[in-house]
Image (cartoon, grey):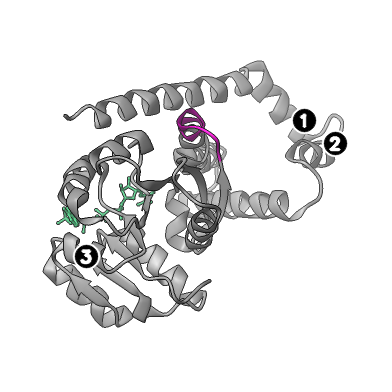
Amino acid sequence: MQNLTTIGFIGAGNMAYALISGLINNGFSAQNIKLSDTDAALLSLRADEFNLEVFTDNVKLAAQCEVIVFAVKPQVLSLVCKELQQHINHNPLIISIAAGVRATDINRWLGGDTAIVRTMPNTPALLGKGATGMLANEAVSDKQKALAGQILSAVGSCLWVEDEKMLDAVTALSGSGPAYFFLLIESMAKAGVALGLDEASAEKLSIQTALGASMMASSSDDSAHQLRAKVTSKNGTTQAAIESFQDQDFEMIVAHAMRAAFDRSREMGTELGDDD
Ligand SMILES: NC(=O)c1ccc[n+]([C@@H]2O[C@H](COP(=O)([O-])OP(=O)(O)OC[C@H]3O[C@@H](n4cnc5c(N)ncnc54)[C@H](OP(=O)(O)O)[C@@H]3O)[C@@H](O)[C@H]2O)c1
């Protein structure tokens, strides 16, 4: 990554921490990272840990950065944007990681004609294992797009989508997705206890199985469907379980749940953008 670029983070919470750690671990110089937050104690902690420059004034930070990452909660984003509106004449690239807030609303709050990359990361980003959907508006150059990709790659894998609606689909899949897997882990552990295992063993087996299956799916050339077929012997135990899932229309249950997340994401986008 170009160490000449200065990246400023507004909001010093969990996600900023994950991204800054990822950037520094990938060789980006802490001297070119700046951080602002309203919480002076948190800033002091971050400054000590990363040895970077911190600000309690977002405007001062923004003036010094070519890339500004919005890492505040969605509900405060409009305030942050409006505060910066008169102070981004140097045309920085804006990267928002705030869930649900549309790039069109961010652009309007910033006064228009701003280069904006809206992203939808997920919680495993905190471990460097995130999955992030990204959307660039028309003002973003190819160089800025590449830079945004490099920054988000510091916490996992990224892919670009073409419109806001596709970010709602990303939200329904990978954004909310970790919770679906937690639910499956939880349900399998409970079912294991019902079959006689003690709670700790059932939970351990359930978590390790999720980890192993996920690693197999990500490292194998086979699709998830092929991997499933390979471990499902005719008349065996796995087949009995899969048939039971299918009898309850498991695919439809998942499809309905994701449609509900997609619809809610669209609703929230409207609610969060409707503050003028
Ligand atoms: N955590 C995740 O896994 C995850 C996943 C996907 C997307 N996201 C998105 O990432 C964003 C950040 O999430 P997070 O978990 O890092 O939140 P967080 O830990 O609450 O961090 C946000 C920080 O911003 C500070 N802040 C509030 N108002 C501010 C202002 N006007 N100027 C500067 N800083 C301000 C907050 O201070 P106070 O606490 O004092 O208000 C807090 O320290 C959110 O929009 C969320 O939707 C998070």
Q: CA distance from mark 3 to mark 2?
A: 56 Å
**In percent of the image, x 18 and y 51: which residue is there?**
86
Which of pointers 3 and 2 lies earlier in the amino acid sequence?
A: 3
In this view of the protein, which residue sits in the foreground, 265 or 237? 265
In this view of the protein, which residue sits in the foreground, 52 or 112? 112
**In percent of the image, x 54 and y 47: which residue is there?**
197
Part of the protein shown in magenta? 161-169
Looking at the rendered structure, which numbered label has been put on residue 233? 2
**In percent of the image, x 26 and y 74: which residue is there?**
46
Q: Position of residue 109 (x, y in %)?
A: 23, 39
Badge 1: residue crowd in 10 Å (few <14, some 14–19, many ≥20): some
Looking at the rendered structure, which numbered label has been put on residue 181? none
The residue at which mark 1 appears reads as: 239
Q: Is residue 238 above or below residue 136?
A: above
Badge 2: residue crowd in 10 Å (few <14, some 14–19, many ≥20): few
Task: Using the rendered image of the protein, determine whether residue 129 is visible from the camera's viewpoint.
Answer: no
Q: Is residue 217 above or below residue 275?
A: below
Ligand 1: does it lie within 8 Å of the C-beta at label 3?
yes
Ligand 1: does it lie within 8 Å of the C-beta at label 1?
no
Which of pointers 2 and 1 lies earlier in the amino acid sequence?
A: 2
The residue at which mark 3 appears reads as: 36
Q: Is residue 16 above or below residue 228?
A: below
Q: CA distance from mark 3 to mark 1?
A: 54 Å
Q: Is residue 200 magenta?
A: no
In this view of the protein, which residue sits in the foreground, 210 or 202? 210
SS under mark 3: strand
Left or right: residue 114 versus residue 143 is left
SS under mark 1: helix
Residue placed furthest toward the right: 234
Q: Nearer the viewer, mark 3 or mark 2?
A: 3
